[in-house]
Image (spheres, helix red, strand yellow):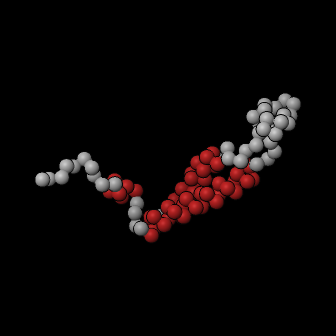
Amino acid sequence: MSWVSFLALFFITWWVVLFAILPFSLRTQDEDEDVTLGTVPSAPRGPHMLRAVLRTTIVTMVLLGIFYGITRGLGLGIDDIPHIMPDFSQRPEN
């Protein structure tokens, strides 16, 4: 895999992980019982994007490290996915 492909994979994975991690550790104004006038009660309480970006980067690095270990260490690729699971559709011969 070239470095351009790896950067593209990192970028796509980073965005997917970002949207998966955003809701975690989010405190709303309603939970703190301090709703600012003119905002909805479900608005976030204080900035939390820096923590979300750091967590996203760490999780993405771990996921791509696992991917790298599987593809380089074990030698598996996309073409090997159908061969990982056994074929249960064939009946054993008696």
Residue 21 locus on image (x, y percent)? 64, 48
Camera sees residue 27: yes
Residue at x 40% of width, y 63% of height: 76
Across the whole image, how many numbered discs are drawn on residues? 0
Residue 22 vs 39, above or below: the answer is: below
Considering every residue shown, the one lying at the far right of the view is: 37
Residue at x 44% of width, y 64% of height: 71
Decide if residue 79 is on the left or right side of residue 56: left
Residue at x 54% of width, y 56% of height: 9
Residue 87 vs 3, above or below: the answer is: above
Camera sees residue 8: no
Decide if residue 82 is on the left or right side of residue 89: right
Decide if residue 30 is on the left or right side of residue 3: right
Q: Nearer the viewer, residue 92 or 73?
A: 92
Considering every residue shown, the one lying at the far left of the view is: 94
Considering every residue shown, the one lying at the far bottom of the view is: 73
Residue 62 locus on image (x, y percent)? 58, 61
Residue 18 locus on image (x, y percent)? 64, 49
Residue 75 vs 14, above or below: the answer is: below
Q: Nearer the viewer, residue 19 or 9?
A: 19
Residue 91 vs 5, above or below: the answer is: above
Decide if residue 31 is on the left or right side of residue 24: right
Residue 40 locus on image (x, y percent)? 78, 31
